[in-house]
Amino acid sequence: MNLGRLNHVGVATPSIERSVALYRDLLGATKIHDPFDLPAQGVRVCFVDTPNSQIELLEPLGENSPVLKFLEKNPAGGQHHVCFEVPDIHEAKAEMEAKGAKVLGEPRIGAHGTPVIFVHPKDMGGVLVELMETPKGH
């Protein structure tokens, strides 16, 4: 597996609207996408473009949202995960598992419409890592 580019940094937030205001008003973000619901993952998502990557704002969607558990421990929100692109998600999953890393579940479609997996923080130096199949055409 070859590690690809950093696609985004996921930031959990109790309010996408307040977080958007911070990125816009304090940091000068100018390209902010419309929020949308991703029920399969239990989150509301909003992407903020940066010159070389994106910030993925994640707000809980429902009582079973994994982000809700994160916010219980970190009420103000904070960095939730980092996401790197990989050429083939199934090969990446097999390689991570062969190397002893715990992959959380099976590949599923992420917010960019491509397959993703998450690798447990205990195997990644304390950081939740999302691996995302590089979108076609990139």
Image (tube, rainbow, N blue to C red):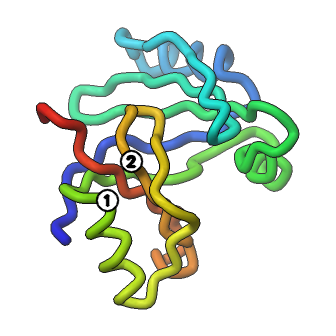
Q: Position of residue 19 (x, y in %)?
A: 62, 23
Q: Is residue 26 left or right of residue 44?
A: left
Tell me the tag on residue 43: none
The residue depicted at 12 percent of the width and 32 percent of the height is 137
94 and 70: which one is in front? 94
Quadrant of the rendered structure where residue 20 is? top right
- Callout 1 amino acid: Ile
53 and 133: which one is in front? 133
Q: Earlier in the sequence, mark 1 or mark 2?
A: 1
The residue depicted at 76 percent of the width and 43 percent of the height is 65
Pointer 1 and pointer 2: residues touching (CB < 8 Å)?
A: yes
Q: Position of residue 69 (x, y in %)?
A: 80, 52
Please, what secondary structure does the residue beneath circle 2 have? strand
Q: Position of residue 97 (x, y in %)?
A: 41, 82
Question: In this rendering, is residue 101 above or below 51?
Answer: below
Quadrant of the rendered structure where residue 55 is? top left
The residue depicted at 19 percent of the width and 56 percent of the height is 87
Question: In this rendering, is residue 88 above or below 99?
Answer: above
Q: Position of residue 10 (x, y in %)?
A: 51, 43
The residue at which mark 1 appears reads as 89
Number of numbered discs on residues:
2
- Callout 2 amino acid: Pro
Please, what secondary structure does the residue beneath circle 1 have? helix
The residue at which mark 2 appears reads as 115
Question: In this rendering, is residue 133 above or below 8?
Answer: below
Question: In this rendering, is residue 110 above or below 99?
Answer: above
The residue depicted at 81 percent of the width and 55 percent of the height is 73
Q: Is residue 15 left or right of residue 36?
A: right
Q: Is residue 53 left or right of residue 72?
A: left
| Placement of the N terminus among the 4 image quadrants | bottom left
